[in-house]
Every structure is written in structure tokens, then in C-alpha cells.
């Protein structure tokens, strides 16, 4: 699933094409992607509207429109946007086509069809639970160490579970959670309540460092992730633990452990991570 660095990369790749564009027509082949409002209303409202800016919140892409509506997309497992000329051959699983006033198309392709779209007024954001309950952005300047410590207060359970919890911080998923914990030298099963001040500092530093590194490398491309220009990321080449169960740890040489933690496949070094 695309995580914060992948969604941010998609956002940046689309921004340069879509700013100021007017959506002239919306073609809906698969209406189940559109969760709110009704697909017919979604189409009616979106047609003729202009894209003023592209934002992101956690793993959500936010197209801010001139009308005041926000067109919200969550790519989930396999959702992809492609900015193409109309003569470009249509990929299988193209579920939506957005015609633009410059003659180009924005196409939405999604093999698994778990992606979701909404068109929301500001006051309607609270209707979408996933959006309403999002924790702070891990890379925002507003996330000071003091605030991070307050967010940790009263949190129970293991670190792996905490990092995946979108109400704690927005945008971290399975890949970056494993890399963050390895970088911080913290065991994925460590209880949040057992962290020392130094360990909390290391955790916040690793969260910001690994997400930033992910963005700089334009995301992690496993399976099918590409940005809006069809380009793959390269962070998969820098992964130290994710997907490497059984391989030698790059720090100590011991084989990495693969285990299901918090319901997700987790890779870590039981020697380097305490
Ligand atoms: Zn190790």
C-alpha cells in the first residue's frame, strides 16, 4: 500500500500538471470507487470545477477546487493516477477518466479496486472517519518533541502497532514502520510505556528521517506503485529490514527475524533492536 512518501511523490508528480486545470468531463466506469456523494452527483459537481491546489493528509490526496469542494482520494492497495494524452492506450482496470481543459486526461487505475474517492465541503470532512481521526503529520514543523511525548502519553501496546495507528501519526504503514524501528534500534514488540526519554527522541528522529528519505527517493516501488508520470521510486533499494526476513542484518550479520506482529508481517533484528 502506498504510504506517506509514495502519496507525497504522487502529489508532487501530479501537481505540476494539474494546477489551474479545469475538469471538463468525468467518465465513471466503476462507480464503487466513489464513496460520497452519489456517483452522479460527484460527476455533476466536479465537471467544470478548477484544481486550485494539491494537498496531502496522511495517505489521502486532496485536490482543492475553486468551488470550495475538496476532491479526496485514498489509493489503498493498488490505486494509481496517470496523466496522459487521450490517444495513450487504455490500461486494464481504468475505472475513472477525468478529461482536462488542456486536452490531457487524468486516469484512475486500480487493480484491486479498494481505492476510495470523495467530494467534500469543508464541513463534510468529519463524515469520513479515516480523515477526521487522523493524527498529526509526522513531517510538519508543528510536531515538536514535546508534542510527540504528549501523543505517546496514555498509548498502550507495542511500537509496531502504534506506528501503524493513523490516529497517532498520519501516513506510516508497514514498510516504513519496520524501517523506522530498525533505524531507532527499537524492538517492534517494545511497549510504548517502557520507552526512556532517549528512546523517544530516537524514535521521533527515525520517523522523520526515514519518511524524508522515502520522499527523497520518490517512494518504494514493490509490485505496481508508480507516480503520476508512471515513474517508479527507488527506496526499495535502501530497505534494511522490510521484506528481508532470514537475510543477514546489515549492522550485526545475524539473520533478520520475520514475525507477525499487530496482524502484519514484520521484519527486525533481534540483536540490534531492543
Ligand atoms: Zn542486527
Image: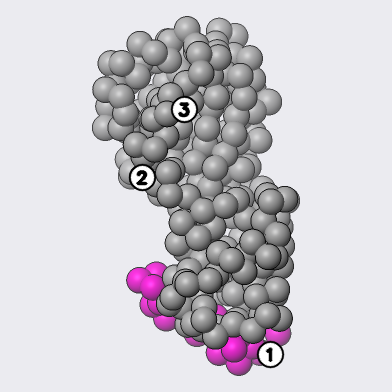
Q: Quadrant of residue 111?
A: top left
Does mark 1's beta carbon lie closer than 8 Å to ligand 1? Answer: yes
- The image's mark for residue 252 is 1
Write the residue at 43% across / 15% down: 46
Q: Within 10 Å of the Cα at label 2, are there few (<14), some (14-19), or many (20+) other Cα atoms? A: few
Name the residue carrying label 3: 122
- Picture coordinates of residue 147, whole percent (x, y): 64, 61
Q: CA distance from mark 2 to mark 3?
A: 14 Å
Q: Nearer the viewer, mark 2 or mark 1?
A: 2
Q: Main secondary structure of the magenta part?
A: loop
In magenta segment, residue 142: no
Does mark 2's beta carbon lie closer than 8 Å to ligand 1? Answer: no
Task: State whether residue 203 is above or below residue 97.
Answer: below
Q: Can residue 265 be seen at all in this image of the molecule?
A: no
Q: CA distance from mark 3 to mark 1?
A: 51 Å
Please state the extent of the stretch shown in magenta in the rendering. 250-274
Seen from the viewer's position, the closer of residues 72 and 219 is: 72
- Picture coordinates of residue 153, whole percent (x, y): 53, 71
Element under disc 2: helix
Amino acid at each position: 500500500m502506498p504510504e506517506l512518501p509514495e502519496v507525497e511523490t504522487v502529489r508532487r508528480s501530479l501537481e505540476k500538471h494539474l494546477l489551474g486545470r479545469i475538469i471538463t468531463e468525468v467518465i465513471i466506469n466503476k462507480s464503487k470507487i466513489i464513496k460520497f456523494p452519489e456517483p452522479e452527483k460527484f460527476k455533476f459537481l466536479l465537471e467544470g470545477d478548477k484544481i486550485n491546489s494539491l494537498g496531502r493528509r496522511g495517505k489521502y490526496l486532496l485536490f482543492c477546487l475553486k468551488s470550495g469542494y475538496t476532491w479526496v482520494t485514498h489509493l489503498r492497495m493498488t490505486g494509481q493516477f496517470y496523466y496522459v494524452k487521450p490517444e495513450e492506450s487504455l490500461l486494464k482496470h481504468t475505472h475513472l477518466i477525468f478529461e482536462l481543459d488542456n486536452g490531457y486526461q487524468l486516469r484512475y487505475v486500480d487493480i484491486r479496486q479498494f481505492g476510495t474517492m470523495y467530494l467534500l465541503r469543508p464541513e463534510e470532512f468529519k463524515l469520513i472517519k479515516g480523515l477526521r481521526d487522523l493524527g498529526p503529520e509526522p513531517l510538519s514543523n508543528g510536531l515538536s518533541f514535546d508534542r510527540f511525548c504528549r501523543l505517546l502519553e496514555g498509548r498502550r501496546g507495542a511500537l509496531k502497532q502504534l506506528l501503524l495507528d493513523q490516529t497517532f501519526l498520519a501516513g506510516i504503514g508497514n514498510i516504513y514502520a519496520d524501517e523506522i524501528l530498525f533505524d531507532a534500534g527499537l524492538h517492534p514488540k517494545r511497549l510504548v510505556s517502557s520507552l526512556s526519554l532517549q528512546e523517544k527522541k530516537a524514535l521521533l528522529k527515525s520517523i522523520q528521517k526515514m519518511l524524508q528519505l522515502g520522499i527523497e527517493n520518490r517512494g518504494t516501488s514493490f509490485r505496481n506503485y508508480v507516480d503520476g508520470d508512471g515513474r517508479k521510486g527507488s527506496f526499495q533499494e535502501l530497505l534494511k529490514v522490510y521484506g528481508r526476513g532470514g537475510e543477514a542484518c546489515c549492522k550485526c550479520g545475524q539473520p533478520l527475524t520475520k514475525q507477525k506482529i499487530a496482524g502484519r508481517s514484520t521484519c527486525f533484528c533481534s540483536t540490534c533492536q531492543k
